[in-house]
Amino acid sequence: MDATDLYRGPLEDFVARRNALVSELRSSDPDAAGAAAKLRKPSVAVWAIDQLAGDDPDVVVELLAAGADAREAQHAAATQDDSRDALLAATGRLRDAVEAVARAAVGVLESAGHASSHETGRRIRATLQTAATGRAADRLALWRGTLDRDLAPSGFGAVDAPEPDGAQLAAVLAPLRRPGSAKPRRQTQGRSQPGTVARERHQAERAAATQDATAERARALATTKRLAARRVAEAARVADDEAAAAERAADEAERAAQAARAALGR
């Protein structure tokens, strides 16, 4: 069991499944066990969202793609006068995507027998909006289905270049991205366009951040693989010990049988 499995399943069993994960990790990786023990039980609103990552990932990916386009359109609107229409189109798509996922999440609640009040629906929508347009870590958690708390709306944030997604998530979103139709201003003959240097700097910073995110993802994957290898090694050791014990028991049983036959032959 890993964190993804932990956040998918009956909400009322979360604590028991978390305790089982901690027990599983304690002998092979105490640090991972300590981290697992700190994983928070989500609210019912966030739990419903997490389930969609496994039950209906397409609707979640569409939301994340809409959020990525909206973030870039908002950034472009802050630096280009002729990109307002693209921003309106992108935010409209985001609004529709949030509503689609929210309806699906309410359906998850109802199917599981949880109440779906107006307040719960509001919290679902606020969390979806904030995750899709906010920090890269929250977007990744939304995609993986490991959100652990309600998120509060905070707009699109600063007008600087948006924080890039990790390489794996970016590749998943790429086919659904709809780049804005905003066109760059025309260059004045012999002069540099105002803001060009700043935009080029943002692009360079974004490329560097993408590489950092890729490296971070690779390190996380390596940690996961190492943990899995430790589990396999531990299981193999236990199996080998059990096999050796079974062989000893078989030898003892065989000797006892031989002794019994010898006693009968006297």
Image (cartoon, rainbow, N blue to C red):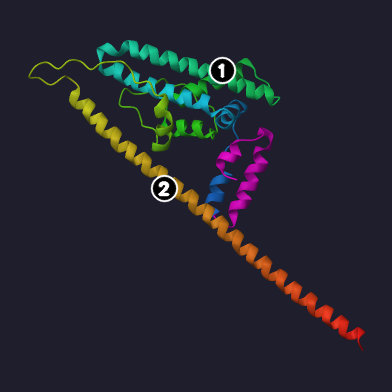
Please name the amino acid that badge 1 sits on: Arg
In percent of width and height, residue 133 lies at 42, 24
Q: Give the range drawn in magenta.
A: 1-29
Viewer-closest of 95 and 178: 178
When asked about the image quadrant of residue 2, the answer is top right
**Which residue is under mark 2?**
219
Please name the amino acid that badge 2 sits on: Arg
Identify the residue at image location x=54%, y=21%. 101
Q: In the rendered image, is residue 39 in sight?
A: no
Identify the residue at image location x=34%, y=27%. 162
Q: In the rendered image, is residue 260 in sight?
A: yes
Give the total of numbered labels.
2
Q: In which quarter of the image is the N terminus?
A: top right
What predominant SS class does the magenta segment belong to?
helix
In percent of width and height, residue 119 lies at 60, 17
**Which residue is under mark 1?**
122
Secondary structure, mark 2, is helix
